[in-house]
Image (cartoon, coloured by chain):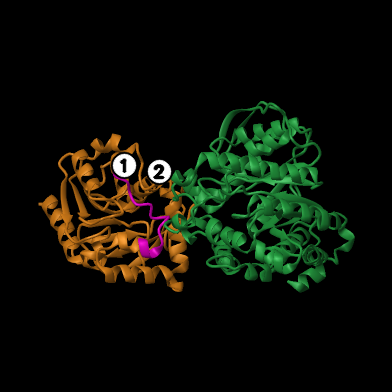
Chain colours: A green, B orange
Amino acid sequence: MRVFVFHLMPYQYMDMEYRERYRAAWVVMSNREYDPKKGHELYNRYLDELELCAELGFDGIAVNEHHQTAYGLMPSPVVTASALARRTKNCKIAILGNAFGLREHPLTLAEEHAMIDNITGGRLITGMVRGVGCEYFSFGANPAQSHERFYEAHDLVVRAWTEPGPFAFEGKYYTFEYVNVWPRPYQQPHPPIWAPSMGSLETIEWAAHPSRKYVYLQNYSALTSVERYLTMYREIAEKKWGYTASSDQLGWGAPTYVAETDEKARDEARVHIESLFNKFLAKTPELMFPPGYLSASSAANMMQHKKQIRGNVTVDGLIEQGIILCGSPKTVLTKLTEAHKRLGFQNFLALLQFGTLPRDLTEKNIRMFASEVMPALQRLTDKEFVGMSLASAVS
Amino acid sequence: MNETLDVRGCKTYVRRLGAGPTLLYLHGMRGLYGDPPFLLRLAERYEVIAPDHPGFGNSDDPEWLDSISDLAYFYADFIEALGLRGVHLVGHSIGGWIALQLAVRSCERLRSLSLVSSAGIRVKGVPRADTFILSPEELARLLFVNGELARRFVEEEADPERFSFNFKNSVTAAKLTWQPRLCDPQLSKWLHRITVPTFILWGESDRVIPPQYAEALHAAIAGSTVKILPECGHVPAVERPDEFVGAISGFIEKVAS
């Protein structure tokens, strides 16, 4: 299994009482709250944490994009990925993801990703996402067209990376006379594309398509939902697209915290993980799902499966549902190994800093995870996966 | 009598009520559920034609629909297909926006234009509400002065029987009005092309599209008249039905005489 560390780079100095005056820590919470001096400290600390992970042997380090929010200070993950490109040597750098379809000109991102791929000699993984609902308020992009526009931006970028230019692109949302991206990507035909998601049939069908076979990454979900969606990917590949999906096409991402004992882990993580879910992540349904962002069936489905992470969650509830992994290294490793046996995902993304988790605890978490959990995970192969039929029965 | 008409390939659900001069009613972003009482009242004097816009209610959601301008051209086709002439066009909210876009293209088939709490133009410095970010409770308080109507609105939003209706309407509304919200900044350039008698009706307490928009439309459309209803929010037809019906029919009668 490949083990990645994932960072959101939250503005962890957010005033929690101030936060309560807003419907979310997104879009409408004033940036008056942001102190650039503290931001300077945080960016450098967070980059240090990712560089430490690279030194400790993680297979990859991952960053992501969000806008107008204290939840994550990376409106451009290209900037953080670039900062990491020359400071790391061997690990993958994964941008999970960039919202290509939110851009008026997705080729600017295609160029930037190609640059990072060239600088790193092919260590880039390109995540393509539609962006969460809030982003459609921030960007003014139309949520009712988000699927179509995302697919078109993807097609444009992949063609720009793979077909000799210049050529004209004539789409519904994008029309360009000259598509001719310099530099071309280092990796051929292009950097691996991943599809991070919080669970969507449309995304799975699209990612699993034989012409793509993109890594589908399930984030922030109860273990039952992880099972449901990863199994759905394998089933769709088998039944709809007529091939057997490789376990390398599947990934799971979860906040992870290890400490000497289960109890200590829980106590140390509690206030910080609860801040992530209750303060940084929590938002109103209108911000989360603007009209058209979800299909009618996904909307009904999502409400059912995600309702557990809204409102006041507790560390105990999060552990119980398997939304986070928290405990002694042995406990966390056992849970991951068992999940891997049932689901066979060959990519795991650990969110090792979350919410207000401070520098010292983050570093302790990173080092303990890297030395006591990660090596055993990295040895897991497809041989330990019991196979889809049992996984289906489990779900 | 309600029917589904095929307008250049788009199945369009149309309410046809009453008899008299033709009144074409263009609804707002939440659509028309059933035959609303205010339409039945208007049908006592007029032949009321009240379609569900393409993308709304019981009408098709056609591939070609991307913008309010598309609906303006659609209604030009619709009026021709039904052979309507001398139409009294009444539009509420985004229905008013469609009516404006239609009228600046051609007033040939129109006899009059009534704009009720109309979207469409932008008055700089006077923001329209972002109806998409608000909870149903918050939105209800902006839509209605009357607390009972606000409470009923919230109930209707949550009514499982209306889920598909509300879902379809809200998705199409977002598609047509998301950016820029509820307006076309270019539209004001062409309002001089409206050459039919125009009536502007607004709620004094409209907090979705504030009454300054009534004044701006009045100033931009030559010969227009304006009426502001006190104690009324964004939906005069529901909150002040008597005044709404009285004002619209009073205006139309004056035009006809």
Letter of the chain that mark 1 sits on in the rendering: B
- Alpha carbons under labels 2 and 1: distance apart: 9 Å
| Residue B81: image tag | none
**A156 falls in the magenta region:** no
Q: Earlier in the sequence, mark 2 or mark 1?
A: 1
Q: Residues within 10 Å of mark 1 (few under 14, many from 20)?
A: many
The amino acid marked with disc number 2 is Pro
Percent position of residue B55, x then y: 44, 56
The spot of residue A306 in percent (x, y) is 59, 65
Residue A289 in picture, x, y percent from top left: 51, 58
The answer to whether A160 appears left or right of B177 in the picture is right
Q: Chain of mark 2?
A: B
The residue identified by callout 2 is B180
Secondary structure character of the magenta stretch overall:
loop
Q: Which residues are magenta?
A: B123-138
Q: Is residue A208 shown left or right of residue B215?
A: right
Q: Is residue A71 left or right of residue B239?
A: right
